[in-house]
Amino acid sequence: MRNKLSVSSRLYLTIIFFILYAPIFFLVFYSFNSGGNMNQFEGFTLDWYKELFQDTRLLIIVLNTVVVALLSALVSTIIGVLGAIAIHSVKRSQTQNALLSLNNVLIVSPDVIIGASFLILLTMVGIKLGFYSVLLSHIAFCIPIVVLMVLPKLKEMSPSLVDAARDLGASRLDVLTKVIIPYITPGIFAGFFMALTYSFDDFAVTFFVTGNGFTTLSVEIYSLARRGIALNINALSTLLFLFTMILVIGYYFIAQRNPKGLGVRK
């Protein structure tokens, strides 16, 4: 019975992973097609990759996307960590649940509504649509994600650690920097990478708040796809997929070498 369940489980996982990764491998496969389309593979070529690296405008858009993703992930991680600590420090469970519910509003709300709301707000405030409008919007919807990644680590931490540090004469800053932050470091890294991923992948919100002269990769790919599929987009997507895989593998090996995180400093 166990063997049957094991075989069926493996078969199920194989089917699921095939459904998830087949479109990606299909895209990667045709990025080497000399035929110029995705209907029939005619021969192997690297011309689309050469064309990609010669497209200065597209490379600038990639750089814009990476800069926005890194900055928004960094800022949202700092704010999200402080927000998670603030929510965790609330004594009343009802108030804590209310704050957590408010934090989750941006996660459960449709992206179209969030994008339209940011567009109206930024226009009313007078912020010109472009780099800063995209950055502010990405920071806003990444903060709740970081809070959700960090809060479970705070709940795992024993209150005795903080009490012991205070009994030994540690200040509030020392408790924060030498006890709390080292303990929740895995959650902080998880929140940072989740925010980075969400910012890098976002299309709906960015589509509303981007302006003339500035765009991100998701919006640009959408615009190019409407004109017709070009295989240089396949090449770009392949490189981004490989870059993502390298990051995931690198983070996995770092986690394996430091399974307990940084721990609490002595």
Image (cartoon, grey):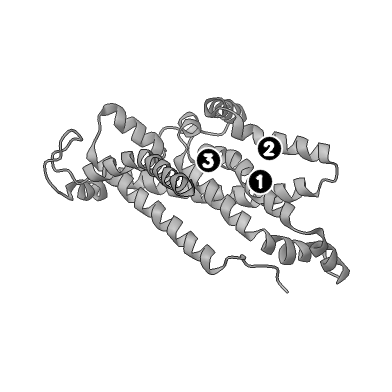
Residue 103: which disc?
2
Q: Residues within 10 Å of mark 2 (few under 14, many from 20)?
A: many
Q: Position of residue 265 (x, y in %)?
A: 70, 71
* 3 and 215: which is toward the camera: 3
Rounded to the nearest whole Å, what is the CA distance between mark 3 and mark 1?
23 Å
Q: Which residue is painted at 27% across and 28% down in the image?
A: 227
Q: Residues within 10 Å of mark 1 (few under 14, many from 20)?
A: many
Q: Which residue lies most toward the left here? A: 42
- Residue under the image location 53 percent in, 29 percent down: 111
| Residue at the spot 56% in from the left edge and 34% down from the top edge | 127
Residue farthest bottom in this picture: 266
Residue that carries the numbered disc 1 in the rendered image: 147
**Residue 108 - label:** none
Do residues under tags 3 and 2 come within 8 Å of each other at their CB atoms?
no
Residue extending furthest toward the right = 167
Pointer 2 or 1: first along the chain:
2
Asked whether 12 or 59 is in front, the reply is 12
Amino acid at the residue labelled 2: Asn
Report if the CB atoms under discs 2 and 1 are less than 8 Å apart. Answer: yes
The disc at residue 132 is 3
Instruction: Classify 177 as above or below 248.
Output: below
Question: Could you tell me how far apart the alpha carbons at marks 2 and 1 are, in whole angstroms?
Answer: 8 Å
The structure residue drawn at horizontal position 61% and vertical position 51%, both measured from the top left corner, is: 77
User: Disc 1 residue type?
Assistant: Val
**Residue 62, position as x, y percentages in the image:** 37, 46
With 178 as the anchor, is 59 left or right in this view?
left
Q: For the residue labelled by badge 2, is the local secondary structure a helix, a strand or a loop? A: helix
Tag 1's secondary structure?
A: helix
